[in-house]
Image (cartoon, grey):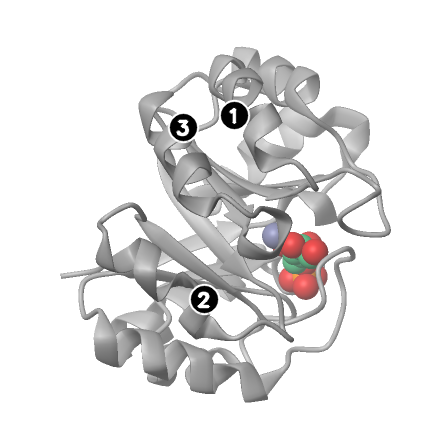
Amino acid sequence: MVKSIIAPSILSGDFADLAADCRRILSYTADWLHVDVMDGHFVPNLTFGPPVVQALRKHIPKGEAFFDCHMMVSEPLVWVGDMAKAGADQYTFHIEATTEPAKVAAAIRDAGMRVGVSVKPKTDVSTVYELVDQGAIDMVLIMTVEPGFGGQKFMGDMMTKVKALRARYPDLDIQVDGGLAPDNIDIAAAAGANVIVAGTSVYKAESPEAAIKTLRASVNRHL
Ligand code: DX5
Ligand code: ZN
């Protein structure tokens, strides 16, 4: 049985004091921190990498928060060791970024992290079936915007992918990422998503706590 997991993207936070900002968002009862790593190559934007994740981990030790790392990088295999050392709990790579997805998935698990695999909006969801069938994957991330930037509009037509996945895998963690908000969460939750990334809609909310509560209640209603 999957459970509801709300993972605010720290990309929308206040980078002037990242640790304090992450602690604040956790205090609003977030379950995970969604850590968006971008390499300026796989996506047209740059954020941060293992050194910043490691620095953040020093302030927020393992057990206090789950670091859900979304790796928007061209060479996912290269960063597995460094991210594990930095304290990542989960490493989500993009299926489009590698010709050896089984090797990447195995390396992530060998390094002691949970394994996520992500598909961009134009990528067919069936590209990850073989990996999931092999038991190599803990979570599939369905992108609901083109990766690279926060604050974009939720693509509702991606829900056909979520529905197909949920029908095939009742116990799989299915994450959606991009434009999720209290006013569209029901669409994603009804399709079968149980792990919800939300940046703008949580950080810019008048009450981030209320926003997280609404997201979680919707997922729980549809489990
Ligand atoms: C986009 C990132 C997302 C994004 C979420 O490439 O993967 O995690 O920052 O932010 P919102 O919720 O604002 O779309
Ligand atoms: Zn993300």
Disc nearer the start of the sequence (1/3):
1
Query: Is residue 150 depicted above or below 66 in this figure?
Result: below
Instruction: Choose top left, top right, bottom left or bottom right for residue 195.
Output: bottom left
Disc nearer the start of the sequence (3/2):
3
- Which secondary structure lies at badge 2? helix
Towards the viewer: 183 or 127: 127
Residue 4 percent across, percent down from the top left: 30, 60
Q: Quadrant of the N terminus?
A: bottom left
Q: CA distance from mark 3 to mark 2?
A: 19 Å
Mark 3–mark 2 CB contact (< 8 Å): no
Reading the image, the residue beneath label 3 is: 107
Q: In the displayed orientation, state which residue is furthest to the left.
A: 1
Reading the image, the residue beneath label 2 is: 127
Residue 50, label in figure: none
Mark 1–mark 3 CB contact (< 8 Å): yes
- Which secondary structure lies at badge 1? helix
Front label number (1 vs 3): 3
Residue 135 percent across, percent down from the top left: 22, 49
Q: CA distance from mark 2 to mark 1?
A: 21 Å
Tell whether circle 1 marks a residue whose Cβ is less than 8 angstroms from ligand 2: no
